[in-house]
Amino acid sequence: ILPGQNDTMGIMVLKSRGIFTEAKWYWIGFGAMIGYTLLFNLLYTLALSVLNPLGDTHPTMPENAIKEKHANVTGENLEDPEKKKCRKLELSGGANQNCATSNVGSSSRRKGMVLPFAQLSLSFNAVKYSVDMPQAMSAQGVTDDHLVLLKGVSGSFRPGVLTALMGVSGAGKTTLMDVLAGRKTGGYIEGDITISGYPKKQETFARISGYCEQNDIHSPHVTVYESLAFSAWLRLPSEVDLVTRKVSYLD
């Protein structure tokens, strides 16, 4: 209570805002909340009972997309039946006019620059990652020189196949990704990491691939899209024009 005043600071603030301060308004507000809760739940129940549903929210996947997805998983060669038929006719020497027209039509639909893109696979075998034993653990009596974080992990990532790396917190998911991407500058890495069967060379891998770390540094002056666009532009050859960089590649 301020000197010379009968009301507390809170009451004075409420009065200055034009809010009622009588005790009866506590119960009026409580009753209003109960009324609004009952009213809105009643309207929500009536809407669900009377209104028609919006329909199936699951998007339908075209048959071609399903076949392509299955081919990516199984590694099968996916080819259009018409193209396969024309290929057989060409091999037998009996290609007709329809095949030639189809080839011309498919080539005429291609517009702009076609960017070179090679699908690569990444495989790793018996990957082991260890760091120097922390002093805190050494003080507790641990005699080992190194603390092993990854113990003989093997696996592969195929192009066009979404692979989920799952595990409990602290299992080493982020550590494994950092090791495969070459972001670990300290510690000791053992094992084989290959790109489409060839040993991974970090200089080349960093130039042709992008990797977003879990805790990465992002400039506050650019958007995420601008950062991805700039990173993609750096990996394109110099002969790619600006329009192709923006439209054909990024979008």
Image: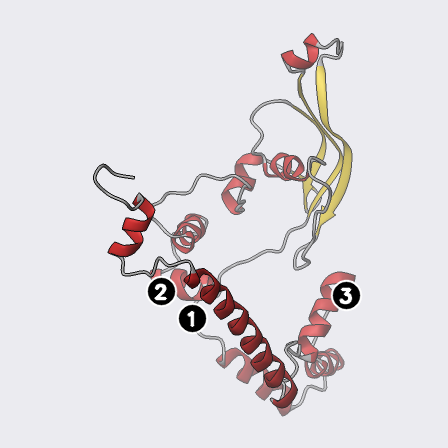
Q: Where residue 196 sits: x, y (%)?
A: 68, 47
Q: Earlier in the sequence, mark 1 or mark 3?
A: 3
Mark 1 vs mark 3, CA separation in Å: 29 Å
Q: What residue would you read off at disc 1? A: 112
- Tell me which corner region of the image, top left, top right, bottom left or bottom right, holds residue 84: bottom right
Depth check: give the residue in front, 142 or 105: 142
Depth check: give the residue in front, 166 or 12: 12
Q: Where residue 60 sits: x, y (%)?
A: 66, 79
Residue at 53%, 35% (x, y): give it: 203
Figure coloring: secondary structure
Q: What residue would you read off at disc 2? A: 243
Decide if residue 221 is in sight here.
no
The amino acid type of the residue labelled 2 equals: Val
Circles 1, 3 touching at the beta carbon (< 8 Å): no
What secondary structure is marked by label 2? helix
Label annotation for residue 76: 3
Q: Where residue 233 sits: x, y (%)?
A: 41, 52
What secondary structure is marked by label 1? loop
Mark 2 vs mark 3, CA separation in Å: 34 Å
Q: Earlier in the sequence, mark 2 or mark 3?
A: 3
Depth check: give the residue in front, 8 or 136: 8
Residue at 62%, 81% (x, y): give it: 45
Q: Is residue 63 above or below residue 209?
A: below
Circles 1, 2 touching at the beta carbon (< 8 Å): yes
Q: Residues within 10 Å of mark 2 (few under 14, many from 20)?
A: few
Q: Is residue 246 above or below residue 215?
A: below
Q: Is residue 219 above or below residue 22?
A: above
The amino acid type of the residue labelled 3 equals: Glu
What secondary structure is marked by label 3? loop
